[in-house]
């Protein structure tokens, strides 16, 4: 990833997203996706009803690690999310863990549909991963969200890994990108919240299989680029 996306988002600010208000259902494939993508916006929604759903516990982020096991990640990553949300100002967040297999959401699509359907039905706005984000779990979660909302419930889709593997040149989805406004203090809270994901943004050991998953340009984009959704 270069700075090209950040530069375009700053030089050509998209139109602002239209927020319908009401109850917000925030879907993620892994604990941290939502904060990486829309943490600044979330910090502005502290006084409205927010329901968070994580499809997996992110236990497969370090498959070859000698420093941490999948079972330890299952415990630590959901706790990191709660801590991060509290740093955004979301106290006692309502988080529902589906505990489906990390890396295996494509094969769990029917389970996702069944468990998400009643939650989507109660939401005024659904926010989910972009269905073409490039990570198979993100894509599966986003596809199911598209199916369940089906034009009846407003849906915002957020990119995460998209910024790492695409360049701002004739992307088919650019025309649907919408801006999420935030303040300097919102963005500062987001940066503090991102640091709470210790298992993802810091090396767990010097070993090659224990390096940070979210680092370099992707982390810089999450910390400093304008937040957008595809709506």
Image: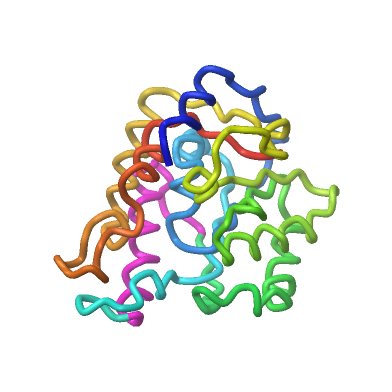
Nearer to us in this view, 110 or 116: 110
Please check the rendered image and state whether residue 79 is part of the magenta-colored stretch, yes or no: yes
User: How many discs mark residues in the rendered view?
Assistant: 0
Residue 73 x, y percent position in the rendering = 33, 73
Q: Which residue does the image show at 58% across and 33% down from the upper left?
A: 168
> Magenta segment, which residues?
70-94
Q: Is the magenta stretch mostly helix, strand or loop?
A: helix
Q: Which picture quadrant has residue 105?
A: bottom right
Magenta-drawn stretch contains 47: no
Give coordinates of residue 95: x percent, y percent.
50, 62
What residue is at 68 percent from the left and 49 percent from the top? 126
Residue at 73% x, 77% y is 110
Taking 163 as reference, is 179 above or below it? above
Using the rendered view, name the quadrant where residue 173 is placed: top right
Q: Where is residue 129 in the image (x, y as percent from the top left)?
A: 60, 53
Closest to the observer, 216 or 71: 216
Please tell me whether residue 51 is drawn above or below residue 223 in the rendered image. below
Left or right: residue 24 versus residue 210 is right
- In depth, the one of 226 and 113 nearer the eye is 226
In the displayed structure, does residue 54 sit left or right of residue 215?
A: right
Residue 59's x, y, as percent? Answer: 40, 74
Q: Left or right: 128 with respect to 218? A: right
Q: State the scheme by which the image is colored.
A: rainbow
Q: In which quarter of the image is the N terminus?
A: top left
Q: In this view, does 140 lie above or below 179?
A: below
Q: In this view, does 75 lie above or below 47?
A: below
Quarter of the rendering occupied by the C terminus:
top right
Identity of the residue furthest to the top in this view: 11
What residue appears at the point 32 percent right and 69 percent down from the top-left corner?
76
């Amino acid at each position: 990833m270069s700075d090209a996306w950040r530069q375009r988002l700053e030089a050509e600010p998209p139109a602002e997203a239209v927020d319908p208000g009401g109850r917000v259902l925030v879907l993620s494939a892994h604990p941290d996706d939502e904060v990486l993508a829309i943490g600044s916006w979330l910090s502005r929604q502290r006084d409205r009803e927010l329901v968070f759903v994580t499809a997996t516990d992110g236990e497969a982020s370090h498959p070859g690690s000698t420093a941490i096991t999948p079972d330890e990640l299952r415990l630590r990553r959901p706790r990191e999310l709660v801590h991060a949300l509290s740093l955004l100002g979301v106290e006692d967040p309502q988080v529902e863990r589906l505990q489906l297999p990390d890396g295996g959401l494509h094969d769990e699509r029917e389970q996702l549909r069944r468990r998400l359907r009643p939650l989507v039905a109660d939401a005024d706005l659904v926010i989910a991963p972009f269905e073409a984000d490039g990570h198979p779990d993100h894509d599966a979660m986003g596809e199911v969200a598209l199916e369940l909302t089906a034009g009846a419930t407003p849906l915002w889709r957020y990119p995460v890994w998209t910024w790492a593997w695409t360049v701002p040149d004739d992307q088919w989805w650019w025309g649907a990108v919408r801006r999420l406004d935030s303040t300097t203090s919102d963005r500062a809270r987001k940066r503090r919240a991102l640091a709470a994901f210790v298992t993802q943004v810091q090396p767990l050991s010097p070993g090659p299989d224990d390096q940070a998953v979210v680092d370099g340009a992707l982390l810089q984009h999450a910390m400093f680029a304008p937040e957008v959704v595809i709506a």
